[in-house]
Image (cartoon, coloured by chain):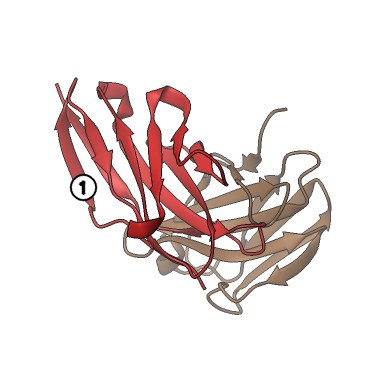
Chain colours: A red, B brown
Amino acid sequence: AQSVTQPDIHITVSEGASLELRCNYSYGATPYLFWYVQSPGQGLQLLLKYFSGDTLVQGIKGFEAEFKRSQSSFNLRKPSVHWSDAAEYFCAVGAAGGSYIPTFGRGTSLIVHP
Amino acid sequence: DAGVIQSPRHEVTEMGQEVTLRCKPISGHDYLFWYRQTMMRGLELLIYFNNNVPIDDSGMPEDRFSAKMPNASFSTLKIQPSEPRDSAVYFCASSKDRGYEQFFGPGTRLTVL
């Protein structure tokens, strides 16, 4: 079975600063990887996903993530954070081919200071 | 498409009462998931359906919880009797296939007094 760890419960950044949210996964084969965002009072929304190919994937709202197989990581990045990015971010890992339901991490809460 | 629709958005009830949460998945999605989100336990998968058939309900916490999917466009999650520890946000999500991206509804915030 797969598992995912988001080591940071909270991250605080200043508006305009760069951001990196960490995600480490455990899975014995090629994973499917996802990042979701949850704004206050709303459901989760897909930011980006990795299935295969280019290990640097672009998503919505200016986010990107890089799959590093050697480090079992799929970190989320944004070069310049906006106040509206304050939200909860979830990493999820599934199995290539879609044979397993994705497992979600505990989430990282992003706080943006003006 | 309107996305996944959940109702009600908020529910406040008293301990011992029956609660029914409703979900309409995205048309054409064969998988439907029910999740519960709390501060203590994070996002928990309760049950999921494939083509209206329950596949895995191992996440359902107790016999007080039950879920049905009578057709492809409607599912319910019922708690009877409800308890204060059931207070949480309940999400419904749907997807085209089991391992692919899920589309979440806005959630139902349940408060049991």
Q: Where is A64 relative to B78, above or below?
A: above
Residue that badge 1 annotates: A10
| Extreme-bottom residue of the structure | B63
Residue A109 relative to residue B56: left or right: left
Q: Which quadrant is the C terminus of chain A positioned in?
A: top left
Amino acid type for the residue under numbered disc 1 = His
Instruction: Indicate the quadrant where residue B98 lies.
Output: bottom right
Residue A7 x %, y %:
25, 57
Q: Is residue A30 visible?
A: yes
| Badge 1: residue crowd in 10 Å (few <14, some 14–19, many ≥20) | few
The percent position of residue A41, horizontal first and vertical second, equals 42, 37
Nearer to us in this view, A58 or B106 = A58
Q: Give SS at disc 1.
A: strand
- Which of the 4 image quarters holds residue B68? bottom right
Q: Nearer the viewer, residue B104 or A15?
A: A15
Q: Is residue B111 visible?
A: no
Q: Residue at x 49, y 50 (%)?
A: A33
Left or right of A7: which side holds A24?
right
Task: Identify the residue shown where x is 39% and y is 41%.
Answer: A66
A64 relative to B102, above or below = above
Q: Quadrant of residue A85?
A: top left
Q: Position of residue A81 (x, y in %)?
A: 25, 24
> Chain under label 1?
A
